[in-house]
Amino acid sequence: MALEFNIWPGSASLSEVNQYTNFGFYNSDTSFISESVAATQWAASRLGYPVNDVELTNSNFISAFEESVNEYSAMVNANNIKEYMLLLQGSSTNVNLTGREIRGGLGRIIRLTDAYGAETGTGGDITWKTGSIDLIPHQQVYDLNSLFAAVSESGNSIRIKRIFHDIEPAQIRQFDPLGITTPIGVMGLGNLAGLSGGGTVGYPGTSYILRPVYEDLLRMQAIEFNDQMRRSAYTFEITNNNIRIFPIPTSPMKLWFHYIVKNEGDSAFTSGSLGEGKITDQSDIPYQNIIYSNINSVGRQWIRRYFLSICKITLGGIRAKFGNIPIPNSEITLDGESLRNEGATERNILIDELKDMLEKSGKKNQLTNKQEEDENIQKILSKVPLGIFVM
């Protein structure tokens, strides 16, 4: 039985393009349509037509060209995702990012620091709550989990952030040298600020006198040292939310504190539901296929070369299916395997070439190149003779 092959008919028409594209991403792009026809004729010529028959059809050529454009678009988009992942995460997925400039900013960086701000009380997105327990005379140790968390947070574990257990600040306990205990005599710096502008001390029936700032500092230091060395300074120890109070309470009082719920502070993800339209990883960053008419000449040439390599692989696979074709008194050996290997090698070289170009054009390498350029300019300028100015 004679072998039958589909042979390239010798031409392609514009009307066939949309008929043979598999995905139809570029069917409305006139540049893609006209380029598909031209690339088909060019590839057939490179494969030996019309001297040799080319066992491919317009369908094979056009779908291979569409695949080449898809591959170029995917690699460019993948590089953009790698470059801008940190900036885009958390943004809306409803905006097509293809062909758009991604402006750098600190928004995402600041959001990453929210967790640190929540822990230190300087910001963040975790609410610091306020709680209190009643201190009992002569009882020093209290379990905040059982006394507070089990009741106020439905048994959820809490993390104490701040304990309000301090003696009055030294600033409001500065007595005047005469030790007068009248309302004026016990005024500290904070009280006197409203009467005389601060930094003064007064006595009943006399005018205010100005005193240097270092005297205020020495007085506060003396009061604080006295509390630490001669008295039981107000402090506490806390381990696993078991708090030990110093000094031991001698009368009923309340102990106030700030805390967060551990489930909120330890959560690794933000609140919200699935599919809420936020970028989470590279799979949902809204990069779409690049518009073919927007691709420059460098990109189009890469697509043509990649397209030819796919045609070689396809044609090689077809010819390898029939390694030898019998003819009268002899047989013909086809070059299917070598053609397929040649196409695969060229394809891999092209992929590495595009990856390298995208890597070198990335922000990191561009900044490095700019730095080297500036340093070289400085070296050149350092050798330029300085002018002599005569007054």
Image (cartoon, rainbow, N blue to C red):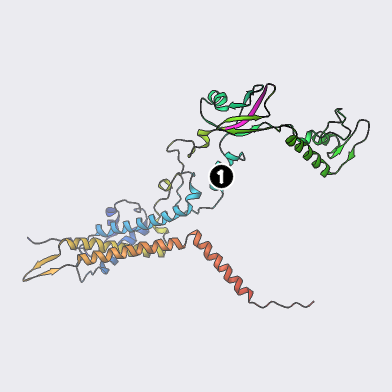
Residue 249, image quadrant: top right
Quick check: 237 above or below 94? above
| Number of other residues with Cα within 10 Å of mark 1, as a class: few under 14, some 14 to 19, many 20 or more | few
Residue visible at 41% across and 63% down in the picture: 356
Quick check: 206 above or below 375? above
> Range of the magenta residues?
251-259
| 363 on left or right of 45 | right
Image location of residue 100, percent across then percent down: 48, 53
Residue visible at 49% across and 62% down in the picture: 365
258 drawn magenta: yes
| Residue that badge 1 annotates | 113
Determine if residue 39 is in view.
no
| 194 on left or right of 33 | right
Residue visible at 68% across and 29% down in the picture: 247
Quick check: 190 above or below 320? above
Image location of residue 321, percent across then percent down: 16, 60
Image location of residue 277, percent across then percent down: 45, 40
Secondary structure of the residue carrying numbered label 1: loop
